[in-house]
Amino acid sequence: MSAAIAFLAGLGSGYLNADKEKQKLKREDEDRALRNEAAQLSIDASKRAVADNQTLRDAGNPATLSDGVAVTDASGNKSLYKAAPDADTMDSMQAEADMRREQTGQAPVPVNVVAAQGLNSSLPGRAKIFTDPAAATAGMAAYNAPDAANQRVVTALRLYDPMKALTMQKEIAQNKVADIQAADAVFRNKLGTAMVGGHDGLAKLVSDSTSDGMNQHQLTAVPSADGKMVTYNKVGPDGKLTPTS
């Protein structure tokens, strides 16, 4: 091999080696980019899972009541305060209310402050203000009812896992059917036992029931003079009998 040929071969070999190194560095950069993308996707998925789990917990969490005062502002909106605002704040709110009503041609109305209870929920937009204690208790009971909590969880789950939400919805429906069937079986058993006792047994069944509106009354079976008919009578506190209608 002449010196010229050897020189050219060296140039060619150097070029090929440099190209291989360039390709290697390119592959390493691409692999690094893919690893970084995969790592970021994993981080994003973990963050979403944490956020989704928190949403589900918030949906299932029970609500609580807090005592305070409801203040109606110039817009007619109620806000719950732990205590009545100070005099300066009330004067400012009243002035704003008066100004707005003058602009609309309406007569001034005092800013209203009343004792109230707030329904506190982990979910945004679910807070409520009650000025009636009975309504507040009923509102909290309705929010915390198992069926209501399950439905909130299904609604939250539907946002990011519709199939799992559908499965849960079906399970809830199946459980309701099972509960109805179980309750029906219990009632049928009680009815059978009551029928063995005749009219007295049936009167006791109705008296003990909590679902027919008669549970606060004692019923007794009163046969007619000829014994051919039986009338069910309510037994009053004084022992007086009143035929059921």
Image (spheres, helix red, strand yellow):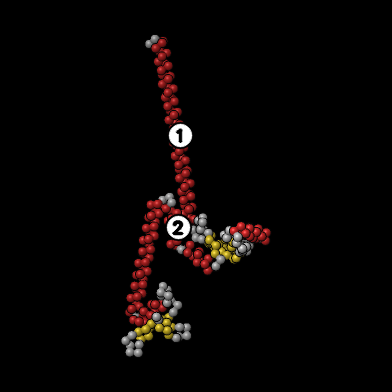
Query: Where residue 37 appears, x then y in whole percent?
Result: 45, 38
Please name the residue that numbered disc 2 is placed on: 152
Residue type at tag 1: Arg
Q: Looking at the image, is mark 1 or mark 2 earlier in the sequence?
A: 1
Q: Amino acid at mark 2?
A: Arg
The x and y percentages for residue 183 are 37, 69
Q: Callout 1 environment at 10 Å: few (<14), some (14 to 19), or many (20+)? A: few
Taking depth in this image into account, of 102 and 202 the one nearest to the observer is: 102
Does 118 sit above or below residue 41?
below
| Residue 9 spot, x, y in % from top left | 40, 15
Q: Could you tell me if residue 74 is visible in this image?
A: no
What is the spatial separation of the Cα atoms under label 1 and label 2, in whole angstroms?
A: 43 Å
Horizontal relation, residue 71 to residue 226: left or right: right
Q: Which residue appears at 43% of the width and 33% of the height? A: 31
Q: Nearer the viewer, mark 1 or mark 2?
A: 2
Residue hosting label 1: 32
